[in-house]
Image (tube, rainbow, N blue to C red):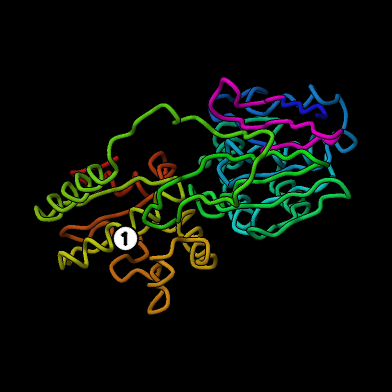
Amino acid sequence: MPELKVTPLGAGQDVGRSCILLNMGGKNIMLDCGMHMGYNDERRFPDFSYISDGPLTPFIDCVIISHFHLDHCGALPFMSEMVGYTGPIYMTHPTKAIAPILLEDMRKVSVEKKGDQNFFTSQMIKDCMKKVIAVTLHQSVMVDNDIEIKAYYAGHVLGAAMFWIKVGSQSVVYTGDYNMTPDRHLGAAWIDKCRPDLLISESTYATTIRDSKRCREKDFLKKVHECVDRGGKVLIPVFALGRAQELCILLETYWERMNLKAPIYFALGLTEKANNYYKMFITWTNQKIRKTFVQRNMFDFKHIKAFDRQFIDNPGPMVVFATPGMLHAGLSLQIFKNGLPTKIT
Ligand SMILES: [Zn+2]
């Protein structure tokens, strides 16, 4: 059997900075290009000097990105625009649409708030995204005459994919985070029956049993309900894109079922933009949402409205979603100072 070599430039024994170099049949394929959220120095990006001290184009045949989380794509503009890579980059359509929003948000925090130097610019994010070739699920893509790739649904977040990669007689399946059970807004991972020579999988929570989601959700709804019943205000800091959508759906359904009247607001910003992407890519969500979509778009929430600053002083109960970044300087802080008795994390 021809040699198959795997070199983790990130992740490996670590959480974050997923970046795996796969060498098969004489081809070099980079699987994910993430950043480490725990570092502010050069360790935040994979050490590309392992591959070359100069531009990487002659040494890498293609880059494949599994999903939009920054620990999987956060180093991409650095790699392509600063280290130098002009070859093909593959990801799904939703990932291509959402990744630049997260990259720009992270850049702003790093450069404008923390004063980081040697960081990519907004223009570099744009130039990097121009190199991206968006793929559709189950579509066989020939990278060159020898490399064939195919994306499969992974659940986890909108657009997340596993990739089947074939070079010559060998094949590898690579997956970042994936979900085997459908959640409130996404379906379960699925792949064709296959016999890869190697399976590379994310395993961060592989040996952890997390509390039942249903219990946590019930607990969450109970706390929110109690608070608004007392006439209180609830501030929910949400950042993770998928989580925000899930909580919106959860509250929306609960409000409908319990016939609650307290207003729910969604602070404008990152997640609102993302909400629109969920609407655009409704076919990527789970079957239940897709069915509802035939009657009305599930993401056009009946009880959840965009938040306006003038609502801050409104008397009576309310629930507000805002991003944690806003807790430091922005909207959340202002709402918080205006006497929010309850905060749920
Ligand atoms: Zn992820």
Residue shown at the point (69%, 48%) measured from the top left: 122
Along the line of sight, the residue nearer the viewer: 167 or 55: 167
Along the line of sight, the residue nearer the viewer: 187 or 242: 187
What SS does tag 1 mark?
A: strand
Tag 1: amino acid: Tyr
In this picture, residue 229 sits left or right of residue 253: left
Q: Quick check: 252 above or below 109?
A: below
Tell me residue 100's x, y (percent). Answer: 63, 51
In this picture, residue 300 sits left or right of residue 16: left
Corner quadrant of residue 31:
top right
Residue shown at the point (38%, 65%) measured from the top left: 288
Answer few, some or many: residues within 10 Å of disc 1's Cα (few below 14, many 20 plus, some between 14 and 19). many
Tell me residue 300's x, y (percent). Answer: 39, 71
Corner quadrant of residue 196:
top right
Instruction: Name the quadrant of the C terminus.
Output: top left
Residue 27 lies in the magenta-colored region:
yes
Residue 287 lies in the magenta-colored region:
no
Instruction: Name the quadrant of the N terminus.
Output: top right
Tell me residue 213's x, y (percent). Answer: 29, 43
Along the line of sight, the residue nearer the viewer: 311 or 10: 10
How many numbered discs sit on the rendered protein?
Answer: 1
Corner quadrant of residue 208:
top left
Residue shown at the point (42%, 78%) measured from the top left: 294
Tell me residue 257's x, y (percent). Answer: 18, 66
Q: Quick check: 320 above or below 210?
A: below
Residue labelled with disc 1: 265
Along the line of sight, the residue nearer the viewer: 4 or 341: 4
Residue shown at the point (40%, 52%) measured from the top left: 182
In this picture, which residue range is highlighted in magenta? Answer: 7-32
In this picture, residue 180 sits left or right of residue 61: left
